[in-house]
Amino acid sequence: MIEGGSSRNHLLMKSFMYQQPAAWDRLMHVVRESTRDYLAAQIQAGAQAIQLFDSWVGCLAPEDYRAYVLPHSRWVLEGLADYDVPRIHFGTNTTTLLEDMKEAGGEVIGVDWRLPLEQARRIIGAGFAVQGNLDPVLLMAPRDLLVERVKATLAQASPEKGYIFNLGHGVLPPTPMENVEAVIETVHGHLSGRTEGAGPGGSS
């Protein structure tokens, strides 16, 4: 809408945000209303969880996130609370923003690959599930390395505290399908092992 395409440093977007704060706020009201309506329609159509995906927000300093983005994200997420489906809040390159992102709402905070899950949990704190966080480029790695890294991610997961396995961003276009299948098989195998090993009252 502002850059006219992809951007490395979001120069035009951030300049507009700083120089035209009233216009930025009006634009964000349009975006947030469309986003909430769209997510609500997804739930009404049968979605069992929704995700607010903020792919560029990691370019902001924490004070800018709080001033220019957080209120709008909170408005979207709070407006979906009555639907009683899990709300996932995800952004990339958000190591410095995780504490603020949890203030914006959602039951699940997504984490990209730049921060180990254990550290992310310490920042986010109790009361939230975590989603993440395998580097998508690892799906181009040899199968043995890929499976090793998936298992390492799962070992940090603490599923009893709430966890969704996912990539730390989207699947890249050149990703071999057999590597996607290897990830799914490894995750399902891990879950099956936990289920089989859990006694009465155990978790999986």
Image: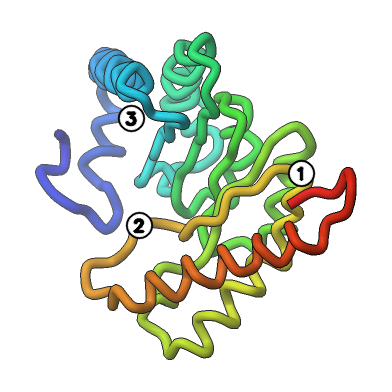
Location of residue 46 with respect to 163 vertically, above or below: above
Residue on which the image places disc 2: 170
Task: Give the alpha-carbon distance from disc 2 to disc 3, as whole Å.
Answer: 29 Å
Q: Quick check: 98 above or below 190?
A: above
- Which residue shows up at 27% across the image and 27% down it? 19
The numbered mark, 1 or 2, whose residue comes first in the sequence reads 1
Residue at position x 70%, y 41% in the image: 124
Measured in 3D between alpha carbons, the distance from the residue under mark 1 to the one under mark 3, in whole angstroms, is: 39 Å
Which one is closest to the eye, mark 1 or mark 3? Answer: 1
Kind of residue sitting beneath label 3: Tyr
| Tally of numbered tags | 3
Q: Position of residue 55 (x, y in %)?
A: 36, 46
Secondary element type, mark 2: loop
Height in image: 98 above or below 8?
A: above
Using the numbered discs, state the Cα–Cα distance from disc 1 to disc 2 in whole angstroms: 24 Å
Nearest to the observer: residue 196 or residue 19: 196
Task: Answer with mark 1 or mark 3, whichever residue precedes in sequence.
Answer: 3
Q: Position of residue 190 (x, y in %)?
A: 65, 67
Q: Amino acid at mark 2?
A: Gly
In the picture of the structure, the residue carrying the numbered disc 3 is 18
Mark 1: secondary structure: helix
First in sequence, mark 2 or 3: give its number. Answer: 3
| Left or right: 51 in relation to 160 | left
Work out whether residue 44 can be spotted.
Answer: yes
Q: Residue furthest left?
A: 4
* 86 sits left or right of 175 in the view: right
The residue mark sitting in front, 2 or 3, is: 2
Residue labelled with disc 1: 161
The residue that appears at 33% across and 62% down in the rendered structure is: 171
Where in the figure is residue 116, as x and y percent of width and height? Answer: 66, 63
Proximity of marks 2 and 3: CB atoms separated by less than 8 Å: no
* Residue type (three-letter) at the residue carrying disc 1: Lys
